[in-house]
Each structure stands twice: as C-alpha cells, then as structure tokens.
C-alpha cells in the first residue's frame, strides 16, 4: 500500500467512525480534474479533503478547487500522515458544536413567496419551479 493510500484509508476510518457522508470523486475522463480526494458532509457542513503523503504538495489546480470551495462556504483541507489525527479532532469539535441545534431551529425560505418556515432535517425532494 502506498503512503498516500494509507492516509486515505485512515481518513475513511475516521469518517466511518463519525457516520459522515462522503464520496471519492473520480477525476479524468468525465470527472473534474483537480477535484479533492474526498467530498464530505457532516452535521450539515461541507468539507473537501485532499490527501497527500511524504511531503507531497497540492497542484495549482487542486489549490484552485480548494479556493472555490472556500468561497462557496465550505472547508477545504489537505491531510497527510502528519496531521490526519487532527482531522478527527476538527470533525468531532464541529459535530459537538452542532449537537445543540434542534431540527426546529432549521429554517427554509420558499423560493416563490420568500416566506421562511420551519423544516425538519432529512431528505427533501426538490421540484422544478414553474
């Protein structure tokens, strides 16, 4: 197993332990070049993680993707063997801070009327606007 594969394996273990949703996009061909190795949603927050090992550096395209993610309100991280355990601490800290947020506090704005109303967390089906 390559050093980077070991980092990816550890990231997967951490995400599984925390019940985080994640995907690992395939780049090249029809995929987006420079996309992060992991796209994660946990406690309503979007994380993107690029894994590296042995002092590997992110490419200019990977860094551009990270900048775009941050501009959109997400968190983009580079994780390697020296800081992978910090990922667990980061995610646990965030999840704990969200634990006091009840479903009744989540609000949605109706796109047609502009009115705000309470919604429960979970799966919603969005329909096309007329």
Image (cartoon, rainbow, N blue to C red):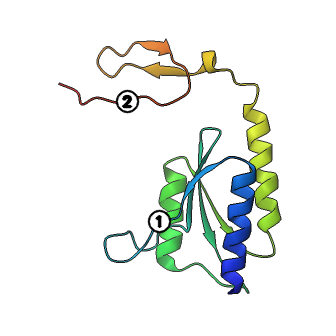
Question: Is residue 56 or residue 104 the one in the foreground?
Answer: 104
Residue 39 horizontal/vertical position (percent) = 54, 57
Residue 122 badge: none
Q: Position of residue 123 (x, y in %)?
A: 48, 31
Q: Is residue 130 left or right of residue 60?
A: left
Q: Quadrant of the C terminus?
A: top left
Residues marked 1 and 2 touching at CB (< 8 Å): no
Residue ID at (54%, 63%): 66
- Mark 2 secondary-structure assignment: loop
Q: Position of residue 34 (x, y in %)?
A: 46, 73
Give the residue displayed 68% in from the left and 20% down from the top.
102
Which residue position is annotated with label 1?
Answer: 25
Front residue (pair 14, 101): 14
Residue 7 point in image, percent of width and height:
71, 74
Q: Which residue is mark 2?
A: 125
Displayed quadrant of residue 113: top left
Q: Residue 14: name its quadrant.
A: bottom right
Q: Residue at coordinates 71% horizontally, 84% vertically from top-left? A: 3
Q: Residue at x 72, y 78 (%)?
A: 6
Residue 31 figure quarter: bottom left
Name which of mark 1 and mark 2 comes first in the sequence. 1
Q: Is residue 49 above or below residue 104?
A: below
Residue 79 in view (yes/no)? no
């Amino acid at each position: 197993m390559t050093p980077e594969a070991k980092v990816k394996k550890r990231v997967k273990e951490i995400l599984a332990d925390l019940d985080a949703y994640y995907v690992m996009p395939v780049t090249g061909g029809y995929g987006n070049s420079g996309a992060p190795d992991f796209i994660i949603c946990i406690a309503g927050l979007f994380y993107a993680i690029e894994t590296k090992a042995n002092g590997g550096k992110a490419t200019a395209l990977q860094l551009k993707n990270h900048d775009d993610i941050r501009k959109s309100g997400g968190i983009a991280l580079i994780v390697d063997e020296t800081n992978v355990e910090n990922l667990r601490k980061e995610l646990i800290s965030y999840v704990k801070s969200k634990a006091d947020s009840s479903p009744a506090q989540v609000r949605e704005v109706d796109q047609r009327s502009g009115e705000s109303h309470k919604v429960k967390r979970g799966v919603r089906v969005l329909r096309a606007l007329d």
